[in-house]
Image: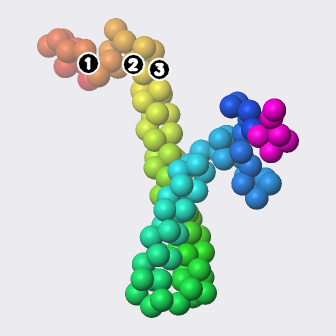
Amino acid sequence: MAGEGDSEPGKSFKLLGFLDVQKVPCSRESVLYGSLGSLVMGLGHFLATSRVRRSCDVAVGGFICTMLGYWFYCRYNLAQQRIRQRMLKEGMKNRVLFEGSYLDPGREQTGSERSDS
């Protein structure tokens, strides 16, 4: 018998009630790396100092810093990738448009064409 808290395989997960982790690019990886950073920093601080409350504070800070750091890194790379895709798409469109004409950069020019330009 399935309870109310059980999720379906296709159902999305919302973090803090508004961030849809499956639909927003880079959010899933950011949360995963943030939780790993939280675990490493909190456990490392606890092993070094044996102070539980302070280690929990360090873990929360580690989660926030790691998550935001990876979020900005991932979004920057995603924007760069989209720019490269847009440039490639435009270049392919121009290649088809100018193919066979005197503006075609891949076309070898003959002697008479060189003297005209």
Where is residue 68 drawn, in percent x and y?
A: 56, 65
Q: Earlier in the sequence, mark 2 or mark 1?
A: 2
Provide the secondary structure element on which disc 2 rests.
Answer: helix
Front residue of 64 and 103 = 64
Badge 2 vs badge 1, beta-carbon distance below 8 Å = yes
**For the point 60% across and 75% down, which residue is it?**
60
**For the point 42% across and 30% down, which residue is it?**
88
Q: What residue is pinned by disc 1?
A: 106
Q: Is residue 25 above or below residue 69?
A: above
Q: Residue furthest left?
A: 111
Where is residue 76 drawn, in percent x and y?
A: 49, 54
Residue 36 highlighted magenta (yes or no) = no
Q: Picture quarter containing residue 4?
A: top right
Residue 95's tag is 2
Front residue of 16 and 115 = 16
Q: Is residue 89 above or below residue 7?
A: above
Residue 2 highlighted magenta (yes or no) = yes
Badge 3 vs badge 1, beta-carbon distance below 8 Å = no
Q: What residue is pinned by disc 3?
A: 93
Q: Is residue 76 left or right of residue 22?
A: left
Name the amino acid type tagged 1: Gly
Question: Badge 3: few (under 14), some or many (20 or more) residues near its Cα, within 10 Å?
Answer: few
Badge 2 vs badge 3, beta-carbon distance below 8 Å = yes
Give, as a single range, the part of the protein colored magenta.
1-6
Where is residue 28 drawn, in percent x and y?
A: 58, 49
Name the amino acid type tagged 2: Arg
Q: Gap in Å between the C-alphas at discs 2 and 3? A: 5 Å
